[in-house]
Image (spheres, rainbow, N blue to C red):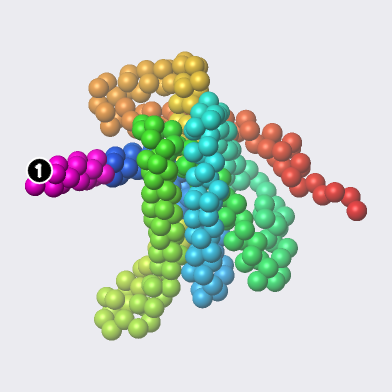
Amino acid sequence: MSGLLALLDDVAGIAKVAAASVDDVAAQSMKAGSKAAGIVIDDAAVTPKYVTGFHPARELPMIWRIARGSFINKLVFLLPVALLMQQFAPWLVPPLLILGGCYLCFEGAEKIAHVLLPHDEQSGGPDGSHGVGDPTHLEEQKVKGAIKTDFILSAEIMTIALSTIESDVLWIQAATLAVVGILITIVVYGVVAVIVKMDDVGLWLSKVGRLSATRALGRGIVAFMPWFLKLLSIVGTAAMLWVGGSIIVHSAHQMGWHWPEDTIHAIAHGIGQGDAVLEWISKAVVDGILGFAIGLALIPLATKVIAPLFDSKPAH
């Protein structure tokens, strides 16, 4: 009898440890997900542009293909690399975060420059889509371009998540990254699917609604969605600059360069005067301004030096 009680006590102890571990994974996942929130907003804001302009019947299949590519990016490629890096080269995390932050700053600044500065609308986008006549080929290019962009944003999400995990236990790190990757992908592409199909929902309501109020609601949705997409693009751009600047400053602090973060904290504290919300907003604004400045400085480097290296084709 005493042996059975001891066994039950051991089982209860194991169950408590397992429950604590599950709680630890959940807590770490929530913390990591909140740190990556800015990139998640940007991801949700960027993706709809890849499926707009296609036949409505192709929108959801395209989103599913992009989401499937995002799952593969995070779970098959990035998660093992992140764990190996954490185990054997943790010193690589801050430099990689700075590199990713620079990319986000460049993307955000480039979007603003694209709006403010004159440009040729017929010259084609970065994917060369203006010159493609075959819809099937264009769809393939758009999906590949979206998955490529997702890979970069996913790398940032996974690296940020990894940098916030406090546990040294390998399986908790792996489980946390997996949970963050799965949940963020579901949330991002679920939201994207809803956003992309809202105009179709509005059109359907405007045509089949039995009540005049229902039909008016449908027409309102159709009229509102273009403005909402513009607002989402602005929010996404601001999130890029804020997150990019914040990542660079915090990663530099981790590498021993404390002046930028200390200065920004001092500015935010001086503005907020003890108000936590106002201090957070002030810090986000300063991080965003810094991110915009860094992005502007990177535009010539990216467009004149880096882009030609990737665009050059070997001579036949």
Q: How many marks?
A: 1
Q: Nearer the viewer, residue 235 or 308?
A: 308
Q: At 63% from the left edge and 43% from the top edge, which residue is drawn?
A: 117
- The percent coordinates of residue 177 (x first, y second) are 42, 44
- The percent coordinates of residue 83 (x first, y second) are 49, 38
Q: Secondary structure at mark 1?
A: helix
Q: Nearer the viewer, residue 222 or 24?
A: 24
- The percent coordinates of residue 146 (x first, y second) are 57, 56
Extent of the magenta region: 1-20
Q: Is residue 144 left or right of residue 186?
A: right
- The percent coordinates of residue 303 (x first, y second) are 70, 40
Residue 315 shows in this picture: yes
Q: At 35% from the left edge and 77% from the top edge, which residue is drawn?
A: 205
Q: At 39% from the left edge and 78% from the top edge, which residue is drawn?
A: 204
Chief SS of the magenta region: helix
Residue 96, quarter of the rendered image? top right
Q: Dot 1, how many residues are within 10 Å of its Cα: few (below 14), some (14-19), or many (20+)?
A: few
227 w.r.t. 159: above or below: below
28 w.r.t. 223: above or below: above
Residue 227 shows in this picture: no
Mark 1 residue type: Ser
Query: Which residue is farthest left?
Result: 1
| 31 drawn magenta | no
Q: Is residue 304 left or right of residue 147?
A: right
The residue tagged 1 is: 2
133 w.r.t. 162: above or below: below
Q: At 32% from the left edge and 20% from the top edge, which residue is drawn?
A: 269
Query: Which residue is farthest right?
Result: 316
